[in-house]
Image (cartoon, rainbow, N blue to C red):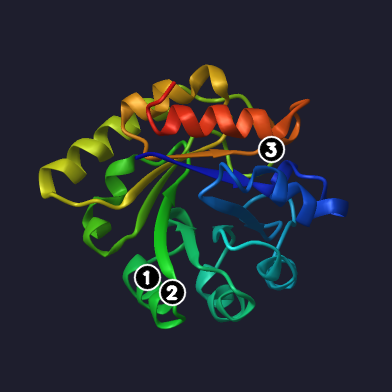
Amino acid sequence: MGKLSVSILSADLAHLADQVKLVEPYADAIHVDVMDGHFAPPITFGGVLVRSLRPCTPLVLHGHLMVDAPESQFDALAQAGMDVVSFHIEAVEDPAPVIRKARDAGMRVGMTVSPPTPVEALFPYLEELDDVMVMSVYPGWAGQRFMPEALPKLEAVRAELDRRGLSPDVQIDGGVKLENARRCIEAGATVLIAASAIYQAEDPAAVARELKAIAEGRA
């Protein structure tokens, strides 16, 4: 069964707990974009926000670390209540010790590829990962247009995982909307990540419900 991860990057942060409650019946995780102003242009969220959000929802909190030296943030995020961290392969020289550090901090761990990076760069580490994230926009701002070039990447990683008999989540992040979500699932994604499609909609809960149905193959 596919999953829906709702990104708070487009949420009304003045009412964040309420925004999360709106989508909680349909979401499997809350996606927290951590950006440092270096690896990705904005400066967004970190441990302080995670600590405030943790008591507000029982959902998995999944940190997408678009930062340099992601391992430097693992302990603080884990202590704040983050459940999973995904870091960019482009941000580290050697992923193996970074993966170990995330696990040592008590979190599940995944890796992410930006649009210019072949998804095959992740293949040496697939056995060690809980999720693989393919970006269909450039790291940074919400509301970017979906890049269909991500679909062959989903197909490639799905084929490799199936070949090896592995089952990490395959996440697609960036510009995911009702009109392209089914194509993402058909290409091999098991998790749809959505931000502006939900929180810029007139009825965020209705869009979240529809995306969840698509992820689960019910629509």
Distance from the alpha carbon under mark 3 to that under mark 2: 26 Å
- Return the residue at label 2: 102
| Viewer can see residue 129 | yes
Where residue 197 sits, quadrant-wise, is: top right
**Residue 92 picture quarter:** bottom left
- The residue carrying mark 1 is 99
Which of marks 2 and 3 precedes in the sequence?
2
The residue tagged 3 is 142
Query: Looking at the image, which residue is at 76% across and 31% down?
Result: 200
Give the amino acid type for the residue marked by disc 1 in the picture: Ile
* Residue at 43%, 33% in the rendered image: 215
Q: Is residue 112 left or right of residue 130?
A: right
- Judge left or right: residue 82 versus residue 14: left
Q: Position of residue 141 (x, y in %)?
A: 69, 40
Q: Label 3: few (<14), some or many (≥20) within 10 Å? A: some
Asked if the residue at tag 1 contacts the one at tag 2, i.e. Cβ–Cβ closer than 8 Å, the answer is yes
Inspect the image, locate mark 2, and give the three-letter code of the amino acid beneath it.
Ala
